[in-house]
Image (spheres, rainbow, N blue to C red):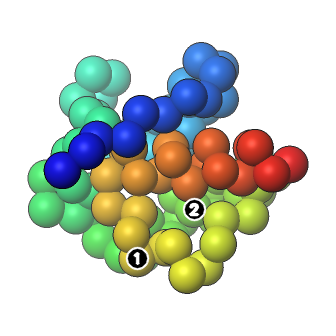
């Protein structure tokens, strides 16, 4: 399995991480690229919807609805945001 790398600029990556940390109530450094939001951080689907909503509202991106179920880790979320940023 090949791990995709995320090429977001540092400021945008930090903003996404801050949103995830706030909504999942995590401390700085606790979130990893491949930790599963639900299984590893005791999150739920409603919290993840809130994360996506905040990213869309605060960062101005619209994440494709068909991808929402695949946003299970920080890496997959960052890749989705990166795709939106490229197409903006």
* Viewer-nearest residue: 20 or 83: 83
Q: Indicate the position of residue 54 as horizontal and vertical percent values.
A: 64, 55
Q: Secondary structure at mark 1?
A: helix
The image quadrant that residue 16 belongs to is top right
Number of residues whose C-alpha sits closer than 10 Å to that of mark 1, classed few (under 14), some (14–19) or many (20 or more): few
The image quadrant that residue 32 belongs to is top left
Q: CA distance from mark 2 to mark 1?
A: 11 Å
The residue that label 2 is drawn on is 52
Q: Indicate the position of residue 19 as horizontal and vertical percent values.
A: 53, 42
Q: Is residue 47 visible?
A: no
Against 69, residue 8 (above or below) is: above
Q: Residue at x 32, y 52 (%)?
A: 73
The dot on residue 26 is: none
Q: Residue at x 29, y 71 (%)?
A: 44
| Residue furthest bottom as drawn | 66
Number of residues whose C-alpha sits closer than 10 Å to that of mark 2, classed few (under 14), some (14–19) or many (20 or more): many
* Viewer-nearest residue: 15 or 9: 9
The residue that label 1 is drawn on is 69
Against 40, residue 64 (above or below) is: below
């Amino acid at each position: 399995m090949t791990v995709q790398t995320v090429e977001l600029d540092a400021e945008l990556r930090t903003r996404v991480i801050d949103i995830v940390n706030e909504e999942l109530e995590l401390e700085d450094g606790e979130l990893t690229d491949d930790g599963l939001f639900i299984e590893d951080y005791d999150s739920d689907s409603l919290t993840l919807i809130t994360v996506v909503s905040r990213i869309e509202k605060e960062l101005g991106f619209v994440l494709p609805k068909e991808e929402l179920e695949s946003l299970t880790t920080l890496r997959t979320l960052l890749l989705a945001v990166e795709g939106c940023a490229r197409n903006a």
